[in-house]
Image: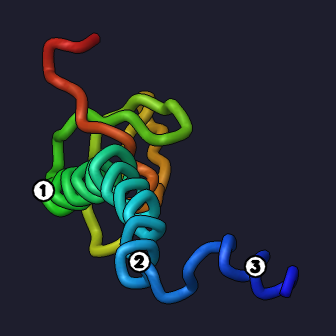
Amino acid sequence: MLAAFAFAMGPNPQAGQGQGGLLGFLPLVLIFVIFYFLLIRPQQKKSKEHKAMLDNLKKGDKVITSGGEYGVIEEVKPNTVIIKIAENTRVKFGKAYIGAVRATEDE
């Protein structure tokens, strides 16, 4: 009789099963949404802008490489660029290593 009374005082296993699962899953969904808008989406946007910048490189553009070298593009090939970094000094870089195109007035 004591065991039956103790069981009657415990939680009802059939009460609220559907809502408990959804409410427990809600924080995970909210965390994913926050990560998407704060981390994933801005990174995709930055990647898309960098790809567009690389596709629009042309001879004469002043660039900065990801290693910090300043130079002027002499030749653009599909995967590489040749950059003039000093008089009679030309260096071949992979296109992906061009960090930014700098404005003409930046000296």
Frontmost residue, 33 versus 70: 33
Residue 69, image x, y percentages: 49, 32
Q: Which residue is drawn at 39% across and 66% down?
A: 23
| Label 2 Cα neighbours within 10 Å, binned few <14 / some 14-19 / many ≥20 | few
| Label 1 Cα neighbours within 10 Å, binned few <14 / some 14-19 / many ≥20 | few
Q: Badge 1 is on which residue?
A: 56
Q: Badge 2 is on which residue?
A: 16
C-alpha distance separating marks 3 and 2: 22 Å
Q: In this view, does 4 lie above or below 85?
A: below
Q: Is mark 2 on a helix, strand or loop?
A: loop
Frontmost residue, 51 versus 80: 51
- Camera-nearest label, 3 or 2: 3
Residue 73 relative to residue 31: left or right: left
C-alpha distance separating marks 2 and 1: 59 Å
Residue 63, image x, y percentages: 30, 36
Q: Is mark 1 on a helix, strand or loop?
A: loop
Residue 58 visible in the snapshot: yes
Give the mark nearer the N terminus: 1 vs 3. Answer: 3
Q: Residue at x 48, y 88 (%)?
A: 14
